[in-house]
Image (tube, grey):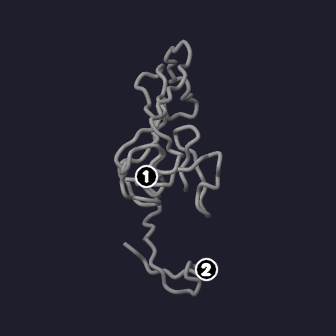
């Protein structure tokens, strides 16, 4: 249900009637949740941590078959693109694999939606953002000028590789 309730200083700035959602009873019947062991203020979440018992952290593995920071196609064949990736191991004692591989290039560019890296054009990568998954231009974290004016090179999961946001 919506109510018509003009408010001084509303977004329109001219006192125009604005439709606002009805606040209802404001949650007056809501009750405080029961405190449980996991919800009590005295509970320490770190007590739940279980050390996987790895003797030493394994060094990350690098597997680059192309260069995602090079001009497209980044060392790949024509109609392909170089896509950076991280392969997270299922065993906590194993090392992550950081790399880039050549795959058929997509067509989506900056800010356009994507469901997988293959949706993005050469020189772009699919990232999760507050606006949903979208393609962003690949950039070098050591050279901020690789992004257009008004955008910033933000780090991706692959060391040294960023995306223009």
Q: Where is residue 6 in the image (x, y as percent from the top left)?
A: 52, 82
Front residue of 130/75: it is 75
Front residue of 145/22: it is 145
Q: Work out whether 5 lies above or below 102.
A: below
Q: Is residue 1 visible?
A: yes
Numbered disc in front, either 2 or 1? 1
Q: Position of residue 93 (x, y in %)?
A: 48, 19
- 64 with respect to 11 (left or right): left
Mark 2 closeness class: few <14, some 14–19, many ≥20 residues within 10 Å = few
Sequence-wise first label, 2 or 1:
2
- Labels in figure, total: 2
- The quarter of the picture where residue 7 lies is bottom right
Callout 2: SS: loop
Q: Work out whether 2 lies above or below 144.
A: below
Mark 1 closeness class: few <14, some 14–19, many ≥20 residues within 10 Å = many
Q: How far, Cα to Cα, is label 2 from label 1?
A: 48 Å
Q: Work out whether 43 lies above or below 32.
A: above
Question: Residue at left 54%, top 46%?
Answer: 69
Q: Work out whether 100 lies above or below 19.
A: above
Front residue of 73/148: it is 73
- 49 with respect to 81 (left or right): right
Callout 1: SS: loop
- 106 with respect to 31 (left or right): left
The residue indicated by pointer 2 is: 9
Question: Residue at left 44%, top 44%?
Answer: 82
Asked if the residues shown at circle 2 and circle 1 are in contact, with their CB atoms under 8 angstroms apart, the answer is no
Q: Residue 122 — which label? A: 1
Q: Can residue 115 be seen in this view?
A: no
């Amino acid at each position: 249900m919506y109510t018509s309730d003009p408010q001084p200083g509303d977004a329109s700035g001219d006192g125009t009637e604005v439709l606002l959602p009805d606040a209802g009873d404001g949650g007056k019947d809501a009750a405080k949740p029961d405190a449980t062991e996991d919800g009590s203020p005295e509970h320490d979440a770190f007590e739940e941590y279980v050390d996987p018992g790895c003797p030493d952290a394994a060094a990350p593995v690098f597997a680059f078959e192309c260069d995602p920071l090079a001009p497209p196609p980044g060392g790949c064949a024509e109609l392909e693109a170089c896509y950076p990736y991280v392969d997270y191991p299922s065993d906590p004692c194993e090392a992550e694999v950081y790399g880039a591989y050549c795959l058929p290039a997509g067509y989506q560019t900056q800010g356009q939606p994507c469901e997988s890296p293959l949706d993005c054009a050469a020189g772009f990568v699919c990232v999760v953002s507050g606006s949903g998954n979208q393609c962003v231009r690949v950039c070098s974290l050591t050279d901020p000028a690789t992004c257009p004016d008004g955008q910033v090179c933000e780090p991706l999961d692959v060391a040294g590789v960023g995306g223009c946001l």
